[in-house]
Amino acid sequence: MASADRLPAWKLAAFAAPALPIAAFATPLGIYMPAFYATEMGLGLTTVGTVLMAARFWDLFTDPLMGVLSDKFPSRWGRRRHWMVLSIPILIVSAFLVMFPGWFVGEQVSVPYLLGSLFLLYIGFTMLTISHLSWGAELTSDYHERSRIQGWREFAHLSSMVLVLLIPAVLEQTGNALSGALKMEAMGWYVIVLAPLAILISVSLVGEKPSVETEPVGFRKAMEVLFTNKYMARILIADLFIAIPGAVRSAVYIFYVTAIIGMPEWSAIIMLSYFAAGPIAVPLWLWINRHMSKHKAAAFGVLLHVIVSACYLIPGQGDALLFACLFFASGIVYGGVPFLLRSITADIVDYDKAESGQDRTGLYYSLITTTGKVGGALGIGLGFPLLDLIGFDPSGPNDPAQLNGLRYVYAFTPVVSELLVFFLLYRFPLGEAMQRKLRERIEESGQASAAER
């Protein structure tokens, strides 16, 4: 690897900083908010699942729009960083609305309030995440350095999840285990303070790399390349089928710890064990990626996760330590999959640029963030109705059949979908050799275009 393409550690850390608030938003929204709004705010399981699913489908419109806007409308800073700064006020206002509902509506929230607040939150979240991912993809053209950049981002993401989960963990151990409102507000302050600091530090210390200008092939051909891109189709399907079971588990996690393990006061500490694996998992999977292609490394991570998932049938009442160990194992085996998929997406952008002559990084990253969000929405929309279907009562008591139903929902949701992901990734055709040839084509096309001008 050329030394000029390798970023120093301090610059990688500064670039990764916005992943801290991104994770700080995602953690309470995926784990604590569904149960909080379903129980303490009085909306019920199916209603909350439906609202969250509807709000996520809003991203089907906003994500591609944001991708196109960030590609087409640069500023003097470049193509990405100004959008990240513009997301700050939107994120702060929406964080207050979503995480401090008692301040605005008292003890009973309405569906329009939750839906509108989430719409606003997801607009800011989209602006930040798509711009940040696209920026990272453009910092280097090297196959392995892209994984390193995304690995640093994932490390920051997982570390922030640990920090934000420490908040409810401390509250649980000080006698506030049942106060969902207190947990949400405490995590809300963490997000509101962290977001502007992390974003402003990042955009101030790290610049953007100029894009190589190539000769475009025309709108019709460019659209044909986009919609017939077999590489992107595989990654989108894989990302979708990874997100669905993860969202189901996140949504029902609190109920699982309460009803199956019988120790709700340890829910945050158990969850911490998953994300505490991050500091080990990310360097481990970066090392594995240096010795095999990204797609095979990701495929093996998914397969190992399927095996660990089946073991979630084992824990019972009082088995908090065993459950935490399984969570830690999940964090290790699955830790490389998200950032490897996003690194592969940067290589797919090279294919698109070589074929279309356009740099559509933002659009491509909007597609992969959309599948993750839609998968998350489908997972939440599926998880809560499944609990209603098996007759599970979040307030209890539940009979053995209902508890076993909860076990099966939690343990087996990932198995079928992730086996499909394994086969999609293992024989993925775009590897290091092909990516290098694509970069050579792009550079040659850029030189020819510059000579004609």
Image (tube, helix red, strand yellow):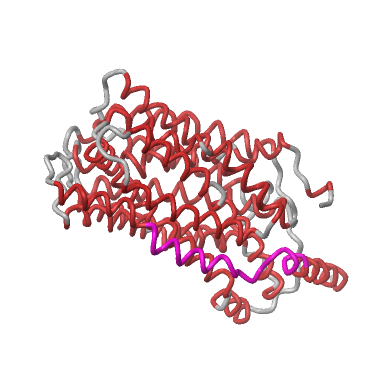
| Vertical arrangement, residue 199 with respect to residue 363, above or below | above
Would residue 188 appear left or right of 401 to someone viewing this image?
A: right
Q: What stretch is highlighted in magenta?
A: 414-436
User: Could you tell me residue 343's position as x and y percent?
Assistant: 62, 56
Position of residue 237 relative to residue 257, above or below, is below
Q: Residue at position x 41%, y 58% from top? A: 59
Instruction: Inspect the magenta stretch and tell me whether residue 430 lies in it.
Output: yes
Q: Quadrant of residue 38?
A: top left
Q: In which quarter of the image is the C terminus?
A: bottom right
* Residue 174 locus on image (x, y percent): 31, 18
> Is 5 displayed left or right of 167 in the figure?
right
- Residue at (32%, 38%) from the top-left corner? 32
Asked whether 190 or 218 is in front, the reply is 190
Picture coordinates of residue 319, whole percent (x, y): 31, 34
Q: Can residue 301 be spotted in the picture?
A: yes
Residue 162 in the image: above or below residue 285: above
Is 306 one of the magenta-colored residues?
Answer: no
**Which residue in the rendered view is the most extreme toward the top?**
174
Quadrant of the image occupied by residue 171: top left
Q: Which of 40 and 283 is in front in this view?
A: 283
Farthest residue, direction right:
451
Q: Provide residue 110's location: percent of width, then percent of height.
A: 19, 45
Q: Is the magenta stretch mostly helix, strand or loop?
A: helix
Q: Is residue 199 visible?
A: no
Q: Left of 441 or right of it: where is 78?
A: left
